[in-house]
Amino acid sequence: MPALPDRRSENIAKIACTAAGAIWGLYWIPVRALHETGIQGFWATAVFYLVPFVLMLPIGLMRWRQIISAGWMMQGIAIIGGLCLVLYSTAFLYTDVIHATLLYYLTPIWSALLARAWLKEPITRDRTFAIVLGTAGLLVILNLDQGLPLPRNPGDWMALIAGLIWALFANVMRRSESSYNTVDVLFSWFFWASIIAVALWLLPILNRPDPPTIDQIVTVLPWLIPVVLFVIIPGFYAITWGVPLLNPGTVGVLFMTEISVGAISAALLTDEPFGTREILGVILITVAGITEVVVPILGTLFPSRRTRVDRDR
């Protein structure tokens, strides 16, 4: 059982993960942009993670001894996270943004249950309320009255499986809290995501588009490199630092901000629907995230009488 972080670090981690979740809600845009340039399928995902790996390569070379000394346990964490990233990113190419995002975000349920069974972490009343609100918003957007939101295509299945893998990743990260350098994990994460994307392309599970040419990759770099430097790397750094400090169920709820950002951005930039049902779902999900972040912070700033008495003892 890892040592619990101090309250201030935990609150900062919650803010970092909430912001990172919102940033993730925009990741479908560059992935689809790569797909539209002719870098398709798993190759789009491979390039999406290969570029940050190459940009971080000087840091990786400077820290190669520390990375090697961390052993295969850290690499195992990076492999699990890489597989999750590849499946989730590629899902946007085979289904609509809303379904990919929402099927992935069943993860708060898987994360909380796994954390309870494996790490013996409690499922608190506040966390249960947040999960119920977030899941209700998810089901509203998915239009539950038309039946259970079961996967309909390969993209839906990839998103659902990615959510299950993320639950495992969050729990492993929590168990190994503070054991590994954040930059080392991030560098390894991008490396394995690139490798896994190519490996999945080799499997006959989907159509296999041709590998991109050097010219195709060079053409996208003028816009992809700024996106990587100012959005992808900072967002993933916040995740890599913040996730180990929080309960996995909490992480899943905080990342639900991605649903709201993803739904709104998809409505603005695509022909995917965004009406009353989607607005109501986004409100419920946003309240769930606020409940998980704001309530504990208010409890710290304004402790109850019982908390003050216990503290004085």
Image (cartoon, rainbow, N blue to C red):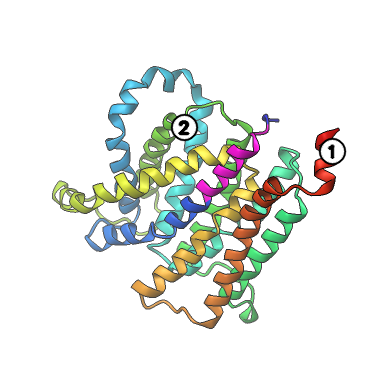
Rendered location of residue 211, percent (x, y): 24, 50
Does residue 207 sit above or below 61 in this rendering?
A: below
Front residue of 300 and 278:
300
Of labels 2 and 1, the one closer to you: 1
**Extreme residue toward the left, this view:** 215
Quarter of the rendering containing residue 194: top left
* Quarter of the image where the N terminus is located: top right
The reply to whether residue 205 is in sight is no
Rendered location of residue 46, percent (x, y): 33, 47
* Residue at x 68% of width, y 54% of height: 295
Residue at image mark 1: 310
Q: Residues within 10 Å of mark 2 (few under 14, many from 20)?
A: some
Which numbered tag is attached to residue 38?
none
Front residue of 281 and 41:
281
Front residue of 187 and 42:
187
Residue at image mark 2: 182
Residue type (three-letter) at the residue carrying disc 2 = Thr
Mark sitting earlier along the chain (2/1): 2
Q: Which residues are magenta?
A: 4-17
* Residue at x 47% of width, y 27% of height: 181
